[in-house]
Image: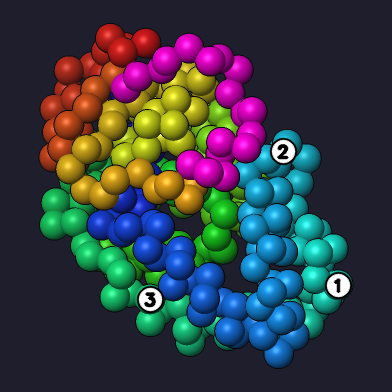
Amino acid sequence: MKAVLFDLDGTLLDLDVDRFMGHYIEALSQEFAPLVPPMRFQPALMAATTAMITNDGSMTNEERFWRVFQEKTGVGREALLPVTERFYRDVYPRLAFVARPVAIAPQLVSEVKAAGMIVVLATNAIFPKVAILERMRWGELDPNLFDLITCYETMHAAKPNPLFYREILERLGVAPCDAVMVGNDPELDVRAAKEAGLSAYLVDDVTPASQIERKFSANTSLTSSHKPLGPDGQGPLAGVLSFIGKGASRSGA
């Protein structure tokens, strides 16, 4: 095993994504209200997010988001960017109350890194990097330990598209058979990763998978197989090193 990909929300960070998204969308709507009324803002945000999740790789998720968001709101990106920057600088950090660090997570990442493996924060690339770094701060995770942090500025696909995982491994120069995805979602973190040829370890002791993300992915047909694709390993986050040490066998394939 040469590379370990970690999900963030619900895996390395104790975050109820459904609860978080409610507060996030409400706060974002209020910030944008002077330019885009909330009744128009929220449908535009959902449409632009769906566009990122169904991105075909022809442009970055950031480019895809803003193309759709501008179409739906009728407001140019140049007018919206200052508001976006202010939101992530001043308002977004206040949402930390919905999250808690996972005690073992920083140590686990350090141990995987010390073992000589490539470490990736493979969080869904539908947020700007500033937002992801902030959530890493909530989880007391050191960004310097990660060889790659996925974000919407640089990625051309999002979970549950297997292209998301293929793009990560192409950047790292790692074959799928030499990588494992660690996450809490059976569809976004397990099925999609295995479609791309990775092994997968399902974390079952942090936070349940998000229903909001599941609803987004349910409206897409991004995987090539309809057969069940279970994890190669399952258990607590603390069991990841043991799983890797056993060779991450593909018994769940």
Q: What residue sits right under mark 2 in the picture?
A: 57
User: How would you rate the neighbour count of disc 3 (Cα within 10 Å): few for under 14, some for 14-19, many for 20 or more?
Assistant: some
The residue range painted magenta reads: 214-231
Q: What residue sits right under mark 1 in the picture?
A: 74
Q: What residue sits right under mark 3 in the picture?
A: 95
User: How would you rate the neighbour count of disc 2 (Cα within 10 Å): few for under 14, some for 14-19, many for 20 or more?
Assistant: some
- Between 172 and 108, the one lying in front of the other is 108
Residue 100 lies, in percent from the top left, at 23, 65
Is residue 105 visible in the rendered image? The answer is yes
- Between 242 and 23, the one lying in front of the other is 23
Q: Is residue 104 above or below residue 70?
A: above
**Residue 95 falls in image quadrant:** bottom left
Q: Residue at 29% x, 75% y: name it.
A: 97
From the viewer's perspective, is the residue at label 2 or at label 3 nearer? Answer: 3
| Cα distance between the residues tagged 1 and 3 | 28 Å
Q: Is residue 215 above or below residue 100?
A: above
Q: Quadrant of the N terminus?
A: top left
N-terminal of the pair, mark 2 or mark 3, is 2
Element carrying mark 2:
loop
Element carrying mark 1:
loop
Residue 212 lies, in percent from the top left, at 48, 50
| Cα distance between the residues tagged 2 and 1 | 25 Å
